[in-house]
Amino acid sequence: LIQIILWLSLVLPLVVESHPVYKELLPVDCEDIFTNGSKHSGVYTIFPAGRDSPVQVWCDMGCDENDSHTDGKWTVIQRRMDGTVNFYRPWDQYKKGFGNVDGEYWLGLESIFMLTWRGKYELKIDMEDFEKGQVFARYSSFSIDPESDKYRLHVSGYIDGGAGDSLSHHNGRDFATFDRDYGNCAKSYEGGFWFSSSCVRANPNGLYKWGSGVSSYSGVQWYSWKGSSYSLKTMVMKIRRVSLDEFEK
């Protein structure tokens, strides 16, 4: 018996060491969710800042009806659709995120920063008016800086989807809210965004209003498509990984 025990004490460590140790890979974004086998659009949990910071998000996996996912795997960072959520909020709430992931919501600046800091992402903005017109604007590169740099916006590589380019006007601008308003734009247009020196060409987080006839830039607006006096029915901002440089090192 003693000999058997001694033999096991020598052999078992070798057996354990000979087998690879697998780490649990937590999904960073909706690309990982898709890769892990979940291919239907819906609410999922991602971990852009690590295991201790789970975040719920809507994943747009593409068209489930015909099983085509060529335009899927998007992580939705913002969605407007019915005016049920107030977007006129202070800095801290824009930092952490707010709203209903099943409906209107803002993912949170810190989560967006953690995602775009870890890899290269593209941005797509889907829009619909109240007459059922649908367009989009796409940008091949999108990222934001950390909070210490006021979550400054970096966006480039516009690809036309019928909406025109209203976001490049905001490139290089700091994020602002009514309690951290660097040019009085957040108070004037009643939402948080990367406002420019002339405030807005795009106003995704403005007050939710209905269609035409609204005061200039006061609604959910995209100037290059509908001008400054039309508030859109829906606007969805979503990002997708182009490469994950940090993970590939």
Image (tube, grey):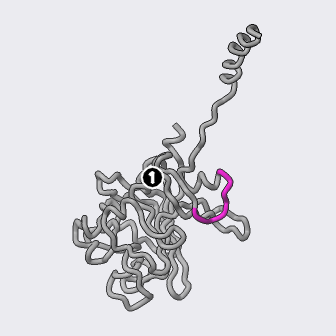
Q: Residue at x 55, y 64 (%)?
A: 58
> Position of 239 compared to 108: left or right?
right
Q: Residue furthest top?
A: 3
- Mark 1 = which residue? 116
Q: Position of residue 82 (x, y in %)?
A: 48, 81
Q: Position of residue 225 (x, y in %)?
A: 45, 79
> Position of 166 compared to 121: left or right?
left
Residue 236 counted in the magenta span? no
Q: Position of residue 99 (x, y in %)?
A: 45, 69
**Of 170 and 159, the residue lying toward us:** 170
Residue stretch rendered in magenta on the structure: 36-43
Name the residue type under label 1.
Thr
Does the rendering let one see residue 150? yes
Residue 37 counted in the magenta span? yes
Q: Position of residue 91 (x, y in %)?
A: 31, 63
Which quadrant holds residue 193?
bottom left
46 in relation to 186, above or below: above
Does the rendering let one see residue 159? no
